[in-house]
Image (cartoon, helix red, strand yellow):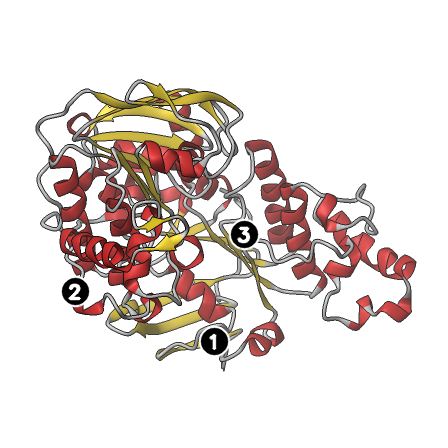
Amino acid sequence: MTDTPVAEAPVLSMRGISKRFGHIQALDNVDFEVRAGEVMALVGENGAGKSTLVKILAGLYRADAGEVRLNGEAIDLGGVLKSEHARIAVVQQELSLVPTLTVAENLFLGSSRGAAWRGPRRVGEDAAPFLERVGLEDLDPLVSIEHLSVAERQLIEIARLVARDARILIFDEPTAALSEKETDGVKRVVRRLRDEGGSIIYVTHRLDEVFDLADRVTVFRDGRSQPPVATGELDVDELIHRMLGSRLEAMYPPHGTTRGEVIMALENLRGPGLEEAVNLEVRRGEIVGLAGQVGSGVSDLLRVVSGTVPPFGGRVMLDGKPVPPYNLGASIRMGIGYASSDRKKDGLFLGRKVAENLTAPSLHLVSRGGWLLGARERAMSRRVAALFQIDPGRLGSIAGTLSGGNQQKVAVGKWLGPEPSVLMVDEPTRGVDVGARAEIYGHLRDLAEQGMAVVFASSDVQEVLGLADTVVTFFRGKVVSVRPRQETDTTTVMREITHRTLAKEAS
């Protein structure tokens, strides 16, 4: 936290902002503000409404109700250009640079200052002052982006906004993919921009960054805002309490009471996104919840185990046998199913029928000699649909026409075709409503009761504690703790996955 004095009147104020997507109320009468020379942290669990608010400020969404004022005057942010004219800019978590262009060309992309007729040398000279302001004064502005590290690219994203003379800068999870040392570089830039009078909105799940950087904090919970509070008036436990509140417990099925023998063992497993080797045993009939925020390593671990990405070392043992590394087909044949967190990108064939999606991981069971056996495909799709309560009348429908909840049921349920011993699911209920969440939780518990081992990764602490028998917490690519569900609680898990110092103490 900083002691820098700030002006009383907000530069940006939002009052009564509401936004609905179908039956989901993403924002409900939200108030939000930020002052000049201030870092305002915006925190809350996934689905609390933070991203929706950011997209309204960026002009990507139009609010259904409410008012936005800039320096006391009402403004319309209905469009990206209007947002840019208001000098509002977003540093996205997912980088938007063009890899084949130079640093200078990316800095002035869309501006006459980057025009080709000016020549690379002049464009590079113009870029130098902006690179210096983000701590990249030694970087050659004529080098291609593709040759730079992730941390350097993140700082160049910030420099782009500085070059556009943005005065309200929104940092949306800017350090999710960065190491601690690289994160310190981003923090230095944030402090410099604040000291220059910029208004900083800092969205993060990492609470240590909140206390390091922010003057005030606004908490979102279930689409509603809480009044901003000075960071100095809070501690970690109080902030966690404000973020979580009370949640409906009835949606979670009872925890399992019996576990079988070890079916899968991870032995000194290392890979992309994992800073330390992982050792973990998973038993039949057990649900293991991997708790961690974006960039914590939970998703990376599932990708390594599934054979989607190559490991750096160690091995995966399944029923006492080593699983060939970086071999998705072998993993499936040996009994490992993996449902990714992005069903639209690599979880479903959205343009194909539901029946085809349900049998996709089982082609070796519904085909012969390269020919699809229609009767087998229909029989398997009906069987899987019945197991996951998917309407059999929708088997001929295109997957992309289903609701989010039904798409997720197909994305997870399709792995029941090959009858895996271990089912791994990344963010099992991302983008689905409460009713579908409860249904998916019930299906996963039923599978565990039938003897399958279930491993899921989630950034939703309540989801992990509500569903898992064993809770594994991650922070910045490292396992912090492995505990039975009954030996931990919400505050403990939240502290371990969001705060660097506390995670180190726990480990």
Between circles 3 and 1, the one closer to the viewer is: 1
Front residue of this view, candidates 6 and 334: 334
On screen, residue 131 above or below 260: below
Q: Which residue is mark 3?
A: 5
Q: Which residue is mark 1?
A: 69
Asked whether residue 218 appears in the rendered view, the answer is: no
On screen, residue 232 above or below 495: below
- As measured in the structure, the alpha-carbon distance from the residue carrying label 1 to the one carrying label 2 is 48 Å
Residue 64: quarter of image? bottom left
Neighbor class of circle 3 (other Cα within 10 Å; few <14, some 14-19, many 20+) is: few
Ranked by sequence position, the earlier of labels 3 and 1 is 3
Front residue of this view, candidates 97 and 189: 97
Q: Are marks 3 and 1 in contact (CB under 8 Å)?
A: no
Residue 494 in the image: state x and y as whole percent: 31, 37
Q: Amino acid at mark 1?
A: Arg
Front residue of this view, candidates 73 and 97: 97
Residue 23 in the image: state x and y as whole percent: 24, 72
Residue 331 in the image: state x and y as whole percent: 38, 34
Asked whether residue 370 appears in the rendered view, the answer is: yes
Neighbor class of circle 1 (other Cα within 10 Å; few <14, some 14-19, many 20+) is: some
Residue at the spot 40% in from the left edge and 34% down from the top edge: 330
On screen, residue 270 above or below 226: above
Q: Which residue is mark 2?
A: 391
Relative placement, left or right, of 344 versus 464 is: right
Residue at the spot 40% in from the left edge and 32% down from the top edge: 305
Relative placement, left or right, of 224 versus 341 is: left
Residue 35 in the image: state x and y as whole percent: 51, 61
Q: Amino acid at mark 3?
A: Pro
Q: Amino acid at mark 2?
A: Asp
Relative placement, left or right, of 442 versus 194 is: left
Residue at the spot 18% in from the left edge and 25% down from the top edge: 487
Residue at the spot 50% in from the left edge and 43% down from the top edge: 176
